[in-house]
Image: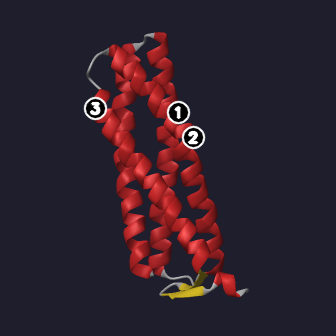
Amino acid sequence: MSEKFKTLRTVSGTVPTMLLLFHLLFIGLWLGCVLTEALFERALLGRGRAHELLLADLHKRVDVWVEIPAFAAVVATGGLLFTQATPSSWLHFKIALGLLAVLTNGVCVGLVFARAKAAHMGNWERFDRLDHVQHKFGAVVLLALLGALGVGLALV
């Protein structure tokens, strides 16, 4: 391995520093996106149907252009890190939390898209039902993401 890719010794093994930094960068981008979405959900939801239509479109755009690429990059870099890590129960726990966050976020994306479609169709009863479920799944995403990040930082 070249000098550019110095390694970092962690509890779970030796990993290239640059790869770990990219992984953490993408996690930060994903987490920042989730928190930002929570803020604009709080700011726009319940302020009238015009605001909720704006919210549905905004959330969908952020999912497509920021959130999906961010968590896909987390999966890619995490997979590469895993191939070089020494397995441990803590590492497996971190991976389980991370996969829970990714899979649940995938469900959330589907709910966000369905909610936007309901808003554009004027089906506000469906919008409200999807919104309620989406926020429950979003809470799981946030908790699993923070848990995986916490365990991961403890392993470094």
Q: Amino acid at mark 1?
A: Arg
Q: Position of residue 118 (x, y in %)?
A: 46, 18
Name the residue tied to disc 3: 43
Q: Is residue 150 toward the left or the right of residue 17 in the image?
A: left
Q: Is residue 129 left or right of residue 94?
A: left
Residue visible at 35% across and 56% down in the picture? 143
Q: Residue at x 50, y 38 (%)?
A: 62
**Identity of the amino acid at label 3?**
Ala
**Residue at left offset 44%, top offset 81%:** 155
Q: Which type of secondary structure does the marked residue at label 2 adopt?
A: helix
Residue 37 appears at what percent x and percent y?
A: 39, 40
The tag on residue 65 is: 2
The amino acid on which the numbered mark 2 sits, given as a three-letter code, is Trp
User: What colouring method underlies this structural image?
Assistant: secondary structure
Q: Residue at x 50, y 67 (%)?
A: 24
Q: Which residue is mark 1?
A: 61
Quadrant housing the C terminus: bottom left
**SS for dot 3:** helix
Q: Are marks 2 and 3 in contact (CB under 8 Å)?
A: no
Residue located farthest toward the right when viewing the structure as drawn: 1
Disc marking residue 10? none
Residue 53 image point, x, y percent = 41, 19
